[in-house]
Amino acid sequence: MTYLLVFLGGGLGAMFRHFINTVSGRMLGTAFPYHTFFINVSGSLVMGLIAGYFAFKGGSSQHVRLFLMTGILGGYTTFSAFSLDAALLYERGAVGLAALYVLGSVALAIAGLFAGLALIRAIT
């Protein structure tokens, strides 16, 4: 059942992401990645709202959390999970580890993308 909830939520999140991509491209153009910027910021905001609500108010089942956080937000943006992980490290007092996680994730993700591009260029 949990996999089905994540699957359904992920589909909804991905559909909403596609909607934002399409609308922002038409309205704002494609010279700057407004769509990704908006999705990352809004997804992180919503993750904070949901995680905070569950942490401070409680009363939510694991199924609801999986559907909303892993499913919908996971399909919408994985940046929200990244942001939550960084915030949790910071909140636990592991400030240095949080900084390392943020800087390392961003730097290595971009490096990984460039490495993938270079590899494909080299073999094609």
Image (spheres, grey):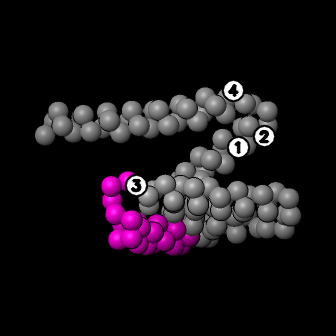
Q: Residue 62, can we see it?
A: yes
Tell me the crowding category of disc 1: few under 14, some 14 to 19, or many 20 or more residues within 10 angstroms, Cα based: some
Image side of residue 103 versus residue 66, left or right: left
Instruction: Indicate whether residue 39 is drawn in magenta.
Output: no
The residue indicated by pointer 3 is 33
- How far apart in space, not on screen, are marks 1 and 4 (Cα)? 12 Å
- How far apart in space, not on screen, are marks 3 and 2 (Cα)? 30 Å
Q: Which mark is residue 96?
A: 4
The kind of residue on which mark 2 rests is Glu
Which one is in front in this view, the residue at disc 3 or the one at disc 2?
3
The residue indicated by pointer 1 is 87
- How far apart in space, not on screen, are marks 4 and 3 (Cα)? 30 Å
Q: Is residue 110 above or below residue 51?
A: above
The residue indicated by pointer 2 is 91
Image side of residue 106 versus residue 115, left or right: right
Q: Secondary structure at mark 3?
A: loop
Whether label 2 touches label 1, CB < 8 Å: yes
Q: Is residue 88 above or below residue 6?
A: above
